[in-house]
Amino acid sequence: MFDIRPVDTDYVRHRAAQFRSQVARRLDGSLTEDEFKPLRLMNGVYLQLHAYMLRVAIPYGTISPDQMRMLAHLAATYDKGYGHWTTRQNIQFNWPKLVDIPDMLDDLASVGMHAIQTSGNTIRNVTTDAFAGAAKDEVTDPRPYAELLRSWSTDHAEFQWLPRKFKIAISGGSRDRALVAAHDIGLRLVEQDGKTGFEVWVGGGLGRTPMLGQVIRDFLPEEDLLPYIEAIIATYNLSGRRDNKYKARIKITVSERGLDVFKAETEEEFLRRRRDFHGADREALAIFRDRFAAPAFRNAGSDGYQAERQANPAFRSWTDTNLHDHKVDGYASVIVTFKSPGQTPGDASADQMRLLADLAEKYGHNDLRISHDQNVVLPHVHKSDLAALYLALREAGLATANAGLTSDIIACPGMDYCALATARSIPIAQEIADHFRAEGLEEEIGKLNIRISGCINACGHHHLGHIGILGLDRAGVENYQITLGGDGYDIPAIGQRAGAGFPAEEVVPAIDRLMRAYLEVRESASERFLDAYRRLGPAPFKAALYPETAHA
Amino acid sequence: MSKAFTPSAAKPGVITANDLREGHNLWMCEDGWTPNPAEATLFEDEAIAELALLKAIGQANLVVGPYLVEAKRGPNGPEPAHFREAFRQTGPSNYFHGIQATKAEAANV
């Protein structure tokens, strides 16, 4: 049953206190590691390759300046001065000491943040479009629904021990920017006969068995959101496999049992569950809608913006790549990429976080978003402020004009940090970015989405990259498989493996051959690599990757 | 994976874990645990190694996740046999953090 929790802070403080006591009992021997491990995982604490790691939730990637400053404080005080934006809109700290984590959780609780359900077989952070509430093509702002789902799923007693972790994404745009098809449940806001509702997808996921979701409901009226989602997860909770970890995600449940069977069970459960919802969810939604009301947008001229664009080519280049269309005239959404030369994709220093907090207050209506491609978005910036914002970002090394381009690479931490990884991701990302910058090809190549994962669990979403790279351990040597043609957005597609893997030092030359082949065959500069791949099929690109085989 | 490893004279191994309180990597040595992998005890006998691993598991008040892993006999002590362990003995490649930094600090003192 859903109930509104008016002040989350009390609850997260309570949970932080619980964890402090659990850590104390682990240290004094009252709890064994086997007993403690599930408790720490419920609070986002992993043991990684060199240290503990704390994953902090950033619900649907939305964060206030004060919260951002708190992340900076944690990075500077308890870590080595930085944090890492994840592909699920969260942040990870790579070096916390276990004995410090209770203090970190107290600090987070003071600004309403926590690490609850960032791990474990529970409903994880609900993700959405980083441009939510700002995008020009938006049907309606998905965040009130995302908050409803977050609020409902937090500590939901029935769903604390699911067969496996569970990820929900919700997209409000006519273009999907939330990877709806790649989630356990994906929701697309749609309008039908003047009513708002959802196209509901189920059974998508990446990992070792990548699958795109299927539509289980073409149109779910918005008032039925919670009972229907609850019905899907309750059905999965009972029928999902618990005998084999690798077959426990809902994608396997749906594919083994068939969508028709799963849908029939869900719909039956939905009728039962709907009777137990008496309107508290709809009241909550109304409150959340107020909470996410649009800021007081300014009505001002933007002549200075156009003049600065004419006068300053670097600024023009940045505005060409790093802005996103805003629904309000005179405004733009700004993408601050964390992919500057030499930077680890998604790593942010404490100083950079503080600067973003300041800039959001000064120019961005106090709103910040973490995007799933490991960048930060200032969703509401008036165009007359863009030149000043650009200067401030440039001084901090945050004005790289590369959003959506070759060097805007998504990469998981890989074997530089992760205990599960089979190879490194970060150096490969850095080498590819450096190479195409040095060759001066980035602008010419245009829109390109490269994604790198350091193991088959696919945190780098490599299957969805136009070019996907998967790092593996082949007989004690790092080896990288390349997939082509993936897409997480308009025409969701799982990338197809091109052929044999490459040793680390051959990855950049292989991608170089691939890009040069693309530049040869594309019809025009506006035909992206992905478009050319779709038009021509894999053959010319495989020939570029494997020239010896092609000539044999 | 590496947890099922059993050492022999041909394929010796070390026992490694993480510090319970702070998380950093540790190796089992003659008088306890060391952050310096070159000081680790090199096990060449399965039975002795298994016994030592039991002892490590029994030290859950000090370490977390102990396991036996293959190592090579080097001129200055055990060396990693696999790149994963090499990274654990060095630190990440994108920043000068972890054991490589600790070692450099110690050398400068």
Image (cartoon, coloured by chain):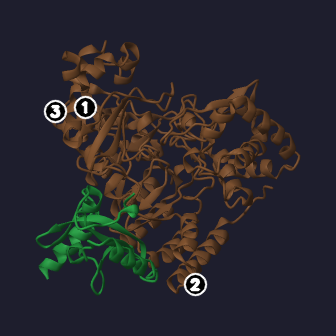
Chain colours: A brown, B green
The chain ID associated with circle 1 is A
For the question of whether residue A465 can be seen, the reply is: yes
Q: Residue at x 53, y 37 (%)?
A: A179
Q: Quadrant of residue A213?
A: top right
Against B17, is A513 above or below?
Answer: above
Tags 3 and 1 touching, CB below 8 Å: no
Residue A92 sits in quarter: bottom left
What quarter of the picture does the N terminus of chain A occupy?
Answer: bottom right
Front in this rendered view, residue A508 or B1: B1
Dividing the picture into quadrants, the one containing residue A461 is: top left
Residue at the spot of label 1: A511
Residue denoted by label 2:
A30
Q: What residue sits right under mark 3 in the picture?
A: A439
Kindly identify which chain the residue marked by label 2 belongs to: A
Residue at 79% x, 47% y is A282
Specify the amino acid type for callout 2.
Ser
Q: Are marks 1 and 2 in contact (CB under 8 Å)?
A: no
Q: Chain of mark 3?
A: A
Q: Dot 3: what SS?
A: loop
| Image coordinates for residue A186, horizontal then vertical, percent | 62, 38
